[in-house]
Image: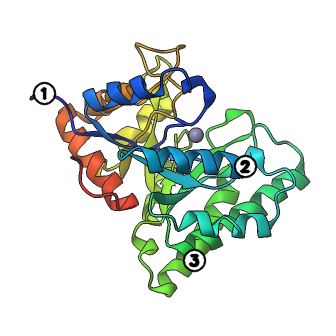
């Protein structure tokens, strides 16, 4: 299979029950498509336990632990700190998926709780030397707004702290996953050391903003991710997504940046290996 691309999927919710009936086949199709590493982020504590069990059973699957911003509810900073014992397991390579979601959460006190939870996760990441997988969604799906502003301020403070701390995270603080913000925000995040995650909507017909972002960014800061089972790329749009489809995203990046898909696959896989420390592609 000489023309199989060396790919990774840096964000896939493989633990969700929509994969229960055929998870093994999904993993086989991923391997056949050249996908040698899959990162599965958690949404809350019980999902973290499922994700870790999956990662410990499957050599090519790795885990992230954390509370998704829409899953914060009654979660306290102590609950988040208590993820520390899970975060240091050998197959757990990141803290995620964490962040800010002002699309589903309109109430100002709940948004404040999201910001506090994000700060607690960043403390955990620093303590366990795990990079962060960040979710960011503006109110009304705008390209920029208060969610981006709040995120940027928090990340500026945190990365300044990382730099004075002399740890390894200053060079690999994390990724802004399924990025749909402005070029300006992407460039600022990159200047702080972050990678930018690219998902299936880049292949959609109305992807002007995401296309602009990919065109403006250096390839050595991009990651490809499916966010499966959501966001299936063309030609699978509207159906269940899976890691094998990540090649369609690499293909679209190659078109936009006038490169070969092989170069995109090799470089984005190396980017992911640097960020998560999971070794070169096999
Ligand atoms: Zn996700």
Quarter holding the N terminus is top left
Q: How is the protein colored in the picture?
A: rainbow
Please identify, in this view, whether the residue under mark 3 or under mark 2 is nearer the observer.
3
User: Pointer 1: residues within 10 angstroms few (<14), some, or many (20+)?
Assistant: few
Label number found at residue 227: none
Q: Position of residue 212 (x, y in %)?
A: 43, 36
Measure how far apart labels 2 and 1 are at the Cα level. 40 Å
Q: Please tell me whether residue 261 is drawn above or below residue 156 in the rendered image.
A: above
Q: Position of residue 72 (x, y in %)?
A: 79, 51
Say left or right for 26 vs 219.
right
Q: Which residue is mark 3?
A: 127
Label number found at residue 69: 2
Q: Earlier in the sequence, mark 3 or mark 1?
A: 1
Measure how far apart labels 3 and 2 are at the Cα level. 20 Å
Mark 3 and ligand 1: say if the CB distance to the nearest ligand atom is below 8 Å: no
Q: Earlier in the sequence, mark 3 or mark 2?
A: 2
Query: Which of the pair 156/232 is nearer the observer?
Result: 232
Contact check, label 3 and label 2, Cβ < 8 Å: no
Which residue, as the protein is rendered here, is positioned at the far left?
Answer: 2
Could you tell me which secondary element the residue under label 3 belongs to?
helix
Query: Which of the pair 170/34 is nearer the observer?
Result: 34
The residue drawn where x is 51% and y is 59% is 94
- Picture quadrant where residue 223 is located: top left
Q: Which residue is mark 1?
A: 3
Measure how far apart labels 3 and 1 are at the Cα level. 41 Å
């Amino acid at each position: 299979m000489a023309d199989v691309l060396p790919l990774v999927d840096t964000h896939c919710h493989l633990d969700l029950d929509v994969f229960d009936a055929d998870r093994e086949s999904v993993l086989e199709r991923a391997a056949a498509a050249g996908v040698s590493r899959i990162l599965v982020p958690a949404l809350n504590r019980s999902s973290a336990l499922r994700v870790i069990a999956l990662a410990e059973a499957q050599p090519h699957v790795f885990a992230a632990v954390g509370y998704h911003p829409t899953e914060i509810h009654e979660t306290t900073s102590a609950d988040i700190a208590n993820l520390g014992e899970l975060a240091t397991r050998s197959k757990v390579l990141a803290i995620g998926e964490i962040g800010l979601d002002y699309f589903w959460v309109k109430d100002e006190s709940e948004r404040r709780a999201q910001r506090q939870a994000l700060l607690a996760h960043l403390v955990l990441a620093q303590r366990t030397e795990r990079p962060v997988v960040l979710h960011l969604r503006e109110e009304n799906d705008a390209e920029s707004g208060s969610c981006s502003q709040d995120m940027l301020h928090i990340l500026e403070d945190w990365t300044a702290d990382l730099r004075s701390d002399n740890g390894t995270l200053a060079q690999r603080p994390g990724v802004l996953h399924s990025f749909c913000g402005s070029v300006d925000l992407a460039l600022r995040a990159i200047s702080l050391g972050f990678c930018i995650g690219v998902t299936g909507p880049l292949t959609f017909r109305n992807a002007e903003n995401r296309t602009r972002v990919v065109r403006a960014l250096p390839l050595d800061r991009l990651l490809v991710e499916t966010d499966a089972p959501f966001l299936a790329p063309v030609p699978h749009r509207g159906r269940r997504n899976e890691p094998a489809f990540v090649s369609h995203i690499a293909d679209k990046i190659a078109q936009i940046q006038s490169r070969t898909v092989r170069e995109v696959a090799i470089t984005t896989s190396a980017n992911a290996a640097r960020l998560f420390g999971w070794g070169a592609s096999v």
